Image: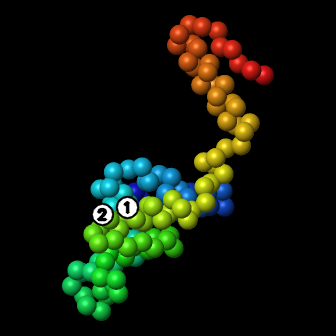
Amino acid sequence: MTNLQTIPAPALTGTTVAQWFLTHYQHGDNDSRTSEIRAAVASGYGRWIAPDDGNISRRPATHQHEITVLDITAVGASAEEAVRNWFKVAAVVIRPSALLNPDPETMLEIRRFALCEIASRFNVTPQVAA
């Protein structure tokens, strides 16, 4: 489970908390994503209302699990479905970070580095375009 206090400040990195959260957890298994959503809720980044929490006054109107984290809301018939739906909605709503989509010059440098690494493993001279 993540300590969400370690999320980098958006002003310093150019990445919002939502972008950071989605990037780090969207490809995990459902159990780990559920744990991270619960950690976000426990850290004050959202709320999770379950239809069967025993408190009638807190029951969601939809009678489903309602998750709101980082101002993104999703529902589901089960906790697992609600988490899956949250990540689906977040992937559509959250604009990709500039850090996650580097500029073309940075990508060229990454490709050059990868080509040199591959060439060194096969003992060949890399053919790097200028």
Residue 17 drawn above or below residue 130 = below
Residue at image position (60%, 55%) is 96
Label 1 Cα neighbours within 10 Å, binned few <14 / some 14-19 / many ≥20: many
Residue 119 in view here: yes
Mark 2 sits on what residue?
80
Q: Which mark is residue 84?
A: 1
Q: Amino acid at mark 1?
A: Arg
Q: In the rendered view, does 48 fall on the left or right side of 104? A: left
Along the line of sight, which residue is nearer the eye, 55 or 30? Answer: 30
Measuring from the top left, give residue 37's x and y in whole percent: 38, 64
56 above or below 109?
Answer: below
Q: Secondary structure at mark 1?
A: helix
Kind of residue indicated by mark 2: Glu
Instruction: Please determine whether, in this image, residue 56 is positioned above or below residue 118.
Output: below
> At 29% from the left edge and 72% from the top edge, which residue is drawn?
77
**What is the quadrant of residue 33 in the picture?**
bottom left
**Residue 92's spot in the image, x, y percent?**
54, 62
Q: Residue at x 50, y 63 (%)?
A: 90
Q: Position of residue 46 (x, y in %)?
A: 44, 74
For this view, does 20 lie left or right of residue 84?
Answer: right
Quadrant in which the N terminus is drawn: bottom left
Pointer 2 local density, CA inside 10 Å: few below 14, some 14–19, many at least 20: some
Q: Quadrant of residue 117?
A: top right
Residue 9 visible in rendering? no
Question: Residue shown at 51%/59% (left/top)?
Answer: 91
Q: Are marks 1 and 2 in contact (CB under 8 Å)?
A: yes
SS for dot 2: helix
